[in-house]
Amino acid sequence: MRVIVTGASGFLGRAIIDKICRQNPDISITAIVRKESDASGIDEKADILYASFDDIDSLEDLFNREEKKIMYHFAWQGVNGEDKRNIDVQLTNIEMAMKYIRLAKSINCDKVLMAGTVAENAIESIENVSTVGAAMFYAAAKTSTRMMAEVLGKSLGLSIVWMQIANVYGVDNNTGNLISYTLKQLDKGQSADFGPAKQPYDFIHIDDLTEAMYRLGIMHTNKSFYYIGSGKPRVLQEYLRYIGEVYGKPEQIRIGRRDDDGIKYRLDMFNIQPLINDIGNYVKRDFEYEVKAMIERGIR
């Protein structure tokens, strides 16, 4: 069996490759990265394949059609920074995803597993906001990709599994998401500023996430969409205040310093039961324990 991972030099790509190498070393891995990317953090057992956007259509001949294959699609430009709101960049991400789905079909992959984000739920709030930030552009692009992927997959007779992922934390997460941002601000001796943070939210440790993604890849699945989270969502400010208290700088967690962005989440958005029904319980990490360990050991 061969696993193909796009965006393999990113946080999720490297993590799933590490997971597969530890869990099942008999699986062959092809790690696809952009030509300008640093592939040094990818496990040496993986075969590195450098490919730009324009190269995707010509990769078909590099794979054995008779070999059993699945694909994890993580490649995405503009997860952070100014490109997050760049429409041209986000439209290219959508087109790139479709190119990889067509490639997967042409090389006889059994399924394509794609990384979504809990931020997609922000789209439900679009009618209630007067202005939009970068997160809304990102959410719209991911949501559009999910819809297009499911339609294209069904038209090709290819199984698409959309993995909507909670906010991820763990070692080597430099994505700038909530936990990463908060710890880095405290490390610099600066405050971490937030909006009201009164709505439900969810975080998942990278090890639990990769366990779920690994099982979704190798096991038979019944659905095209799964939310992957901790199963224990809580009010966002509870998470944030805990980090400040354990770090010893509770005053640096400044709730309410930013305006409410108008994006609302509901508890039912964080339901992992359909996923547990199909792959079993995958959650082993405790948020309080893991965050405390990261802070005490100074690991990021």
Image (cartoon, helix red, strand yellow):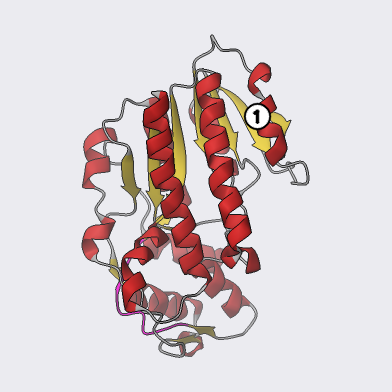
In the picture, residue 131 is in which quadrant?
bottom left
Q: Residue at x 22, y 42 (%)?
A: 274
221 sits left or right of 73 in the view: left
Query: Can residue 284 be seen here?
Result: yes
Secondary structure that dominates the magenta span: loop
Q: Secondary structure at mark 1?
A: helix
Kindly indicate the quadrant of the structure image that contains residue 238: bottom left
The x and y percentages for residue 81 are 63, 67
Q: Which region is colored magenta?
A: 194-202
Residue found 52% across the figure and 63% down from its top: 294
In the image, residue 198 lies in the stretch drawn in magenta? yes
Q: Position of residue 135 (x, y in %)?
A: 49, 68
- Left or right: 232 as drawn, with respect to 167: left
* Residue depicted at x 57% and y 59%: 79
Closer to us: 153 or 12: 153
Q: In the rendering, at what x and y percent does residue 36 appear?
A: 78, 46
Residue 41 lies in quadrant: top right
Is residue 248 one of those drawn in magenta? no
User: Which amino acid, by three-letter code, is at mark 1?
Assistant: Asp
214 or 128: nearer the viewer: 128
What residue is shown with label 1? 57
